[in-house]
Amino acid sequence: MPEPIVPDHQRLAAMRRSYERGGLEEGDLAPTWRAMLDRWLDDAVAGGVREPNAMVVATADAHGRPSVRTVLLKGLDDDGLTFFTNYESAKGRDLAANPYASILFPWHDLQRQVRLTGAVRKLDGAASDAYFASRPYGSRIGALASPQSEVVPDRGALEMARDALLEQYPDPPGDVPRPDAWGGYVLAPDAVEFWQGRPDRLHDRHVYRCDDADGTWSTARLAP
């Protein structure tokens, strides 16, 4: 019998690239996942990756149905990774029902990716206030005007809401209040995988894992 034909397979197969920029050996790993992520984030900046702090965040609802979107990393420390959003958005509803997520940094230009999984908690209100106040005036107005993930009749409705807020909170002084339903989340990773592309799809994968029993971290190499 003839082999089944995948629609458009030739065009898609032609997009294949060989990964030959380098490798990732055990001796290349930093002592901690945080130090390693800092190092690779610096490499992404130095390598000219556009929006190197853009990360894909995957969540799941109470029924296990996943959803994914790209957000910007806005904080990184030993506690985890911080991003901001509307708590009543689709991702906010998912995290209220199922407070776990996975994050991916897809640094294609460097033939690298970093994948993190872990529990997610809300950032405290004072920290969310401080970050919101640091945002550009237009972004603060936009956050207040947009009922994120809700159905709206058209773009005009959003622009009308924005224009009303521009009149209510003129700039200067531009004292736009943080919406009650807007703030930060922190993902505290329990596993962080660093992936470096290699020829013939024999990629290098190293994972830092946290032991739930005592909180210690270990590293291991994964098969590609």
Image: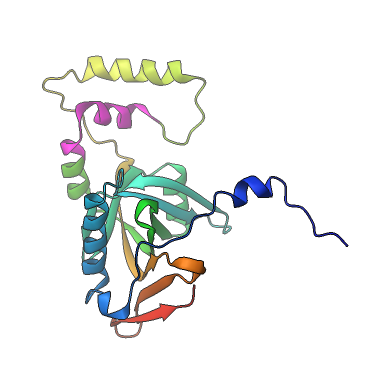
In the rendering, at what x and y percent does residue 73 appear? 29, 50
Q: Is residue 85 above or below residue 121?
A: above
In the rendering, at what x and y percent does residue 12 appear? 61, 48
Q: Residue at x 47, y 36 (%)?
A: 149
> Magenta region, mostly helix, strand or loop?
helix
Q: Residue at x 49, y 55 (%)?
A: 17
| Residue, far right | 1
In the rendering, at what x and y percent does residue 65 appear? 58, 55
Q: In this view of the protein, can residue 124 be seen by the observer?
A: no
Q: Residue at x 20, y 27 (%)?
A: 137
Quadrant where the N terminus lies?
Answer: bottom right
Which one is in front, 105 or 63? 105
Q: Is residue 187 left or right of residue 127?
A: right
Q: Is residue 138 above or below residue 104?
A: above
In the rendering, at what x and y percent does residue 129 appear? 19, 42
Q: In this view of the protein, can residue 92 be seen by the observer?
A: yes
| Residue, far bottom | 214
Q: Is residue 142 above or below residue 71?
A: above
Q: How many marks?
A: 0
Residue range of the region highlighted in magenta in the rendering: 132-146
Q: Residue at x 55, y 49 (%)?
A: 15
Which one is in front, 38 or 159? 38
| Residue, far left | 173
Q: What's the image's color scheme?
A: rainbow
Which one is in front, 202 or 224? 202
Q: Magenta includes 168?
A: no
Q: Is residue 72 left or right of residue 60?
A: left
